[in-house]
Image (spheres, grey):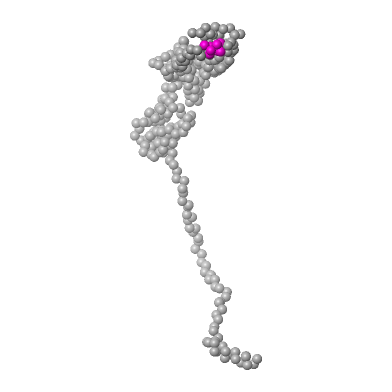
Amino acid sequence: MSQYRKRSKYTEKSGKNKEAAIEAALAELGAKREEVDIEVIDAGSKGFLGIGARDARVKVTLKNAGTDEVKENAHSAAKPDKVKTPKTEKVKKQPSENGVAEDAKKFLADIFAAMNLEVEIDARMDEGSVQIDLSGDNMGIIIGKRGDTLDSLQYLTSLVVNQRSDDYIKVSIDTENYREKRTEALLALSNRLEEKVTRTGKKFTLEPMNPYERRVIHSNLQSSETVTTYSIGQEPYRKVVIAPKGAKYKKDGYKKRNRSRKPKSTPPVKTENTEYTPVTYKADFKPTQHKAEYKNFEDYLAAHQSENTEE
């Protein structure tokens, strides 16, 4: 090949930060910083507590690349080379060196440190899932109202753990055996409501719950002979409805009302029985009746003959 193709004209490299990416690009080109032009494609981001972290990416071009390009084009015009399109390979996620459980533990430790909470974290792998148990003082703060804070921590930890894994890893976080106690409370509640709906024949709508708690109620009452269950609303306000079995309902949980209503007829007003004399209104005038004075024209002439003679 030509002597002018000893090294590439430019390269793109990624790194934890901009400087690391530039050093990697200079090493590949075999050039010094003053011999190249540097273009920052992506400055990268540290993310928030490891979530959304992004490597920096730069493009480094040799300053004399224009001259080399002219010479290379002249050489390639004489003997064209076959251009091969590089195949893009899917980058496989690299597992963490410390292990999935340790990544989850470190992430939670950073959060609790920011909250000024001393929490003991026990994280372990169990058949492809991460089981985490928290212990310490003021666990009520971590549990939150109806477990909302605990569910949020579990969701965020799941995002962090699955960043570096091609296979989905389930994360479960518990403290003071809250999950089991909550499940027992939901089972008792659903049994009481089953009896109430069966007795009254009226449906009952529960407060909004997360998908796990809704599944507990659905599973507990799915074999009931008197009631049925369904969900209504949108997340995060989706609710479970317990209704009598056989009751008509739609997927959205309510019947469509008939908006076309007939106008109400006013009932007759009852009046007291009072004696009164009916009043008859008569016309104040009578039509004028014209009678014929003359039977024929001859009578008319005879009557007016005297008037004509006198004149």
Q: Does residue 155 lie above or below 305 as drawn?
A: above
When the figure is inspected, residue 166 is found, relative to residue 23, above or below; the finding is below
The foreground one among 37 and 182 is: 37
Visible in this render: residue 272? yes
Vertical placement of 107 versus 281: above or below?
above
The structure residue drawn at horizontal position 49% and vertical position 58%, both measured from the top left corner, is 269
Q: Is residue 10 visible?
A: no
Q: Classify residue 188 by image quadrant.
A: top left
Quadrant of the image for the C terminus? bottom right
Q: Residue furthest front?
A: 78
Give yes or no for residue 2 being in the magenta stretch: no
Q: Is residue 305 rendered to the left or right of residue 128?
A: right
- The structure residue drawn at horizontal position 51% and vertical position 14%, both measured from the top left corner, is 77
User: Horizontal and vertical percent for residue 288?
Assistant: 56, 78
Which residue is painted at 64% across and 92% down in the image?
Answer: 310
Between 37 and 49, the one lying in front of the other is: 37
Image coords of residue 45 (percent x, y): 55, 17
- Picture coordinates of residue 31 (x, y %)? 56, 7
Question: In terms of depth relative to the viewer, which is nearer, 164 or 34?
Answer: 34
Stretch in magenta: 68-75
Along the line of sight, the residue nearer the viewer: 236 or 5: 5
